Image (spheres, rainbow, N blue to C red):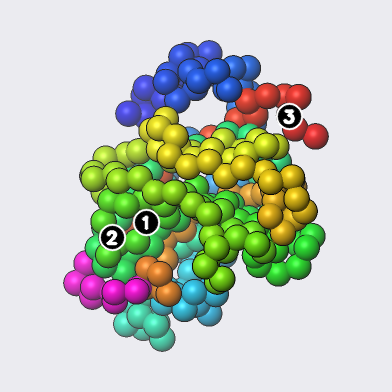
């Protein structure tokens, strides 16, 4: 798989993912192909640390510099959650963020990944804004390119959160698509973020569109740079809704590549 996707950029645009008309003239802005074994590339990623629940009552301690939780091996990034009785909440994992090292306003973001399985797993590929312009979450916005909760195997979600549209008040906007082999095969999860809308894709299939209403930031805060996040949570309000299976660990999310394109150079500020 890696060999196919490491062809020249010119050939990359011939693949179906890039063949749609809206992607003509695409330019690669940022990427990580995960070709060098070891810890994640520190020039592109930081690792957030903590076990405070991350706003969702999650169980994992996110670590930094621990290869068992985050490492590049054999051409893929491995984000791995472990049961760990030495931790107060019983688990460790990793959360990679590109904040301060890679952020974009508009573009086509795609991540090719294979997901963990089992009750209590909660992997996510998502984006948050670089700056706190409007106040705390969810006022600044959130773009969830991929979320999967293990108790509902194969149902992959793409969602946005804003002050007007978020799960805390039951107004969140999102879509979902069934991916039966989510844990055994790699799939490409993508968001095409433009001034007028955000389109969500899995393997090139459009399954959800969130349109810019033209109203203020409460409905569309997506006119500012956002950075990328890759993480694997354990339990939590959503991931642990039906409990955590103690017998499944370790579990991992594998990422083949991350690529960010600017499809239309005139679209960016």
Q: Secondary structure at mark 2?
A: loop
How much space separates mark 3 and mark 2, taking CA atoms?
37 Å
Residue positioned 43% across, 39% down in the render: 207
Measured along the vertical axis of the image, is residue 201 above or below residue 240?
A: above
- Residue 191 position, x and y percent, is 53, 39
What residue sits right under mark 3 in the picture? 267
Residue that label 1 marks: 148
Q: In front here: 227 or 74?
A: 227
Labels 3 and 1 touching (C-beta < 8 A): no
* Marks 1,2: beta carbons within 8 A: yes
The CA span between labels 1 and 2 is 8 Å
Image coordinates for residue 87, horizontal then vertical, percent: 40, 82
- Could you tell which of marks 3 and 1 lies nearer the N-terminus? 1
Please give the residue where the numbered disc 2 appears in the rendered image: 152
- Mark 1 residue element: loop
**Region of the chain picked out in magenta, as a range:** 240-250
Residue 133: which quarter of the image?
Answer: bottom right
| Mark 3: few/some/many CA within 10 Å (<14, 14-19, 20+) | few
Q: How far separated are the C-alphas under marks 3 and 1?
A: 31 Å
Please state the horizontal and vertical placement of residue 91, each as a whole percent of the image: 37, 75
Q: Main secondary structure of the magenta part?
A: loop
Residue 168 included in the magenta stretch of the image: no
Q: Is residue 133 found left or right of 208 in the rendered image? A: right
């Amino acid at each position: 798989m890696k060999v196919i996707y490491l062809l020249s950029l010119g050939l990359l645009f011939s693949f179906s993912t890039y063949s749609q008309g809206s992607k003509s003239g695409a330019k690669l802005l940022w990427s990580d192909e995960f070709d060098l074994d070891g810890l994640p590339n520190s020039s592109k990623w930081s690792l957030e640390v903590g076990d405070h629940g991350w706003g969702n009552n999650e169980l994992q301690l996110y670590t930094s510099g621990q290869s068992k939780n985050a490492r590049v091996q054999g051409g893929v990034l491995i984000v791995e959650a472990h049961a760990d009785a030495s931790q107060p909440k019983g688990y460790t994992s990793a959360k990679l963020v590109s904040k301060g090292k890679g952020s974009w306003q508009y573009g086509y973001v795609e991540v090719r990944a294979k997901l963990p399985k089992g009750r209590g797993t909660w992997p996510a590929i998502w984006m948050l804004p670089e700056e706190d312009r409007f106040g705390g979450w969810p006022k600044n916005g959130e773009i969830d390119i991929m979320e999967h909760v293990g108790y509902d195997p194969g149902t992959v979600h793409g969602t946005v959160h804003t002050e007007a549209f978020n799960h805390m008040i039951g107004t969140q906007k999102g879509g979902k698509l069934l991916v039966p082999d989510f844990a055994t095969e790699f799939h490409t999860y993508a968001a095409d973020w433009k001034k007028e809308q955000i389109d969500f894709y899995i393997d090139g299939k459009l399954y959800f569109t969130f349109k810019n209403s033209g109203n203020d930031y409460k409905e569309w805060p997506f006119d500012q740079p956002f950075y990328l996040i890759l993480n694997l949570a354990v339990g939590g309000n959503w991931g642990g809704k039906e409990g955590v299976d103690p017998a499944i660990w370790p579990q991992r999310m594998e990422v083949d590549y991350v690529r960010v394109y600017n499809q239309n150079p005139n679209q960016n500020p």
